[in-house]
Image (tube, rainbow, N blue to C red):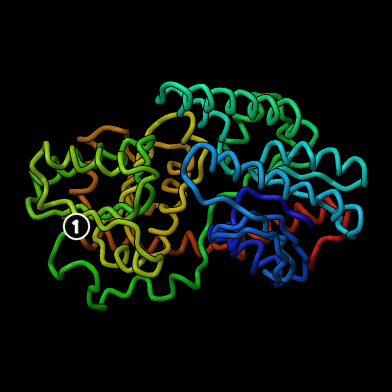
Amino acid sequence: MLVVSSDTYPPFRVDVSVLFGRELAARGHRVDWLLQSEARCDKATKVAWGGGSVWVGATSLGTSLPSRIRKHVLGILHDLKLFSLLRNGDYQIIEVKDKFVSGVFAVIAARLFRKRFVYWLSYPIPEDYLHRADARAGLYRALYRVRGTAFKVLLYRLLLRTADHVFVQSEQMRRDLAAEGVPESKMTPVPMGVDLADFDAAGDEMRVRIRVPPGERCILYLGTLARVRRLDFLIRVLAKVRESVPDAKLYIVGSGNEPADEKALLDETERLGLQSAVVMVGQVPRSQALEYVRDADVCVSPFYPTPILNSTSPTKLVEYMAMGKAVVANDHPEQRLVIEQSGAGYCVGWEEGEFARAIVALLSSPAQAREMGERGRRYVTEHRSYARIADLVERELLAIAGLPQAR
């Protein structure tokens, strides 16, 4: 299989690095990639990765508008290599992940060289661009709107309708795409999972805290601070929690896309006088982030109720559960499903009082929190490890290629 993806090299998302780079590679499947470099790269190169090869494209690291345009142009030119690779290689499938212009190239090449064409959509990208346009002004507003509109037409009218199969992020995304005219029968939801090797030490109640002071009541959020997620909500939740648990602290691990993302949280913290109760950890290496999760008493997964986020599959929720942590999440299609099936915590409405009461209940009953955490860890092991998810993806890919199923 040849994959053209919006991920950069080296891939860091576990749904690429673990699912494809390790699990599918270990089963004998050869997956080659066309990716743009994450680091400075002035000339395309070829490297070995995940049992296959990656053609790494040049990039531009500048943040100005001309630099960003140059980066996109370099990426598109690099992806044109798919024509020669499909013509000369023995690929059975070409897959495009979260790309649009290059997706058109892939459709043409798949027809020319009689390959199966698969599309993988992990996020409603066109809708996100249109949402960003509403929050911008001037030239950027126009650019986001043009881009979002063009990508929406390409995605729903061409790429998904011509694809032999479509992998989506969740059951909700499958329903959303079905409403756009994509047959449900050719879509497979592949939710986010975890690499269980990262969580071997989870649930060790006797271990000494590493990141959080002993005895401190820790509520933890791990993830992006992008403003679309409205995380100032958590600061107001903390204020209500501290009415019942005065020593509770909120640890926020992660960063935003822009400085204004974090500023919005700091402003709300200052407005409510909670400077001593909110710890902004920032972006840290994954190993350190997981140490904060291990030290937490309660982990939270707030997803602002908006159509853009409703179709996502939250990674942090299953990571918390894999660490044996009780969770509080708001009513979101995927989160509701996981909480109901696992019994790993509380799923409540997007309302500060409800969220706070659920957190207080867990802080006030450590035994119950441990029991919920244990249920969550069992659920993730049985349903959301990438070994299990790879079974699903392998089965579908073999069927698409017309090959016998693995034993």
In the rendered view, does 361 fall on the left or right side of 175?
left
Q: Quadrant of residue 91?
A: bottom right
Q: Is mark 1 on a helix, strand or loop?
A: loop
| Relative depth, front residue between 158 and 182 | 158
Q: In the figure, 329 relative to 230: above or below?
A: below
Q: Which residue is drawn at 41% across and 65% down?
A: 286
Q: Residue at x 70, y 40 (%)?
A: 187
> How far from the left and from the top, in percent, is residue 306?
43, 29
Q: Which residue is drawn at 78% across and 46% down?
A: 80
> How far from the left and from the top, in percent, is residue 247?
8, 55
Q: In the figure, 7 relative to 139: above or below?
A: below
Q: Quadrant of residue 394?
A: bottom right
Position of the C terminus by quadrant? bottom right
In the rendered view, does 224 fall on the left or right side of 118?
left
Position of the N terminus by quadrant? bottom right
Location of mark 1 (residue): 365
Q: How crowded is mark 1: few (under 14 residues within 10 Å), some or many (20 or more)?
A: few
| Relative depth, front residue between 344 and 87 | 87
Q: Which residue is drawn at 76% across and 42% down?
A: 165
In the rendered view, does 327 fall on the left or right side of 79?
left
Amino acid at pointer 1 = Ser
Mark count = 1
| Relative depth, front residue between 15 and 353 | 15
> How far from the left and from the top, in percent, is residue 100?
68, 37
